[in-house]
Image: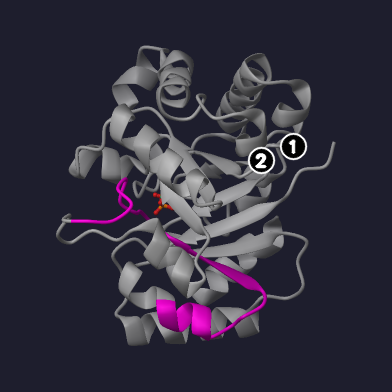
Amino acid sequence: MSRKKIVAGNWKMNTTPSEGLELFNELGRSIASTEAEVIIAAPFLHLPQLVAGNNQRITVAAQNCSQYNSGAYTGEVSVEMLSDIGVNTVIIGHSERRTYFGESHAILKDKVDTVIGKGMRVIFCCGEPLEVRKAENHISYVEKQLKESLFHLSAVQMERVIVAYEPIWAIGTGETASPEQAQDMHHAIRDMIGAQYDKKTADTMSILYGGSVKPTNAAEIFSQADVDGGLVGGASLKVDGFTQIIAAR
Ligand code: PGA
């Protein structure tokens, strides 16, 4: 069954709004026609102008949102605000949010519900730290992340979910999971979705790999049967490299 191919760039807290706009416009000119959907997840402050840039080739996404709909939550950004400016895709559960901002399974479940409740799409990140990988508990670790924050959704709601497997030991470290390690985990995740839901939900779920994806390793990782694209951090900040990664999909 065919699944959507996706290459998503996660700029994290990099670029000023003016630098971001330049990067976005340059990227729009650089990417040739591709069967993959290209997504850029930019800082909140950048989003209105990127959406207004109206680049048909690139979907603009947020890197986070509040679990609350509105109210006295100083410093937070709601899904309503994102939706109002035309942003309909949100990354939830990135390991940096989990680690540095204390986002628990329960908080992430609420965020997933808030985004899905608004009719928007979630890119749900999961992935294990190094000690868990070394102890060979990575599959049950990821299964718990999915069960605690995602698998309460209905099969119909799951159609608006993209899963990103990002082993923490490979994020920003230059160390990448081997194509076999990525494939094994992606296959396991697809099996978990099949067991929780049904074969169609599993077969149609796009599962992205993230963690030091570069122009030099993208093609090999993306060629794995259960890898449907990538979530790319550092390498998405360079137009040439990111264009090559998109072409590898
Ligand atoms: P990286 O980040 O490509 O810089 O390793 C990936 C991510 O955190 O999404």
First reached walking from the N terminus: tag 2 or tag 1: 2
Picture quarter containing residue 181?
A: top right
The residue located at (47%, 79%) in the rendering is 50
Tag 2 residue: 159
Amino acid on which the number 1 mark rests in the picture:
Thr
The residue located at (33%, 82%) in the rendering is 17
217 above or below 138?
Answer: below
Q: Quadrant of the C terminus?
A: bottom right
Instruction: Residue 166: tell me if it is visible.
Output: no
Q: Quadrant of the N terminus?
A: top right
- The front one of 106 and 93 is 106
Tag 1 residue: 204
* Residue 210 image position (x, y, % from top left): 49, 45
Label 1 beta carbon less than 8 Å to ligand 1: no
**Image side of residue 107 versus residue 54, left or right:** left
**Image side of residue 242 versus residue 132, left or right:** right
* Residue 126 image position (x, y, % from top left): 44, 33
What colouring does the structure picture have? one colour
169 above or below 229?
Answer: above
Q: Are marks 2 and 1 in contact (CB under 8 Å)?
A: yes
63 above or below 201?
Answer: below
Instruction: Residue 110: tell me if it is visible.
Output: yes
Q: CA distance from mark 2 to mark 1?
A: 8 Å
Q: Which residues are magenta?
A: 48-71
- The front one of 177 and 26 is 26
Element type at mark 1: helix
Is residue 226 magenta-colored? no
The numbered mark at residue 246 is: none
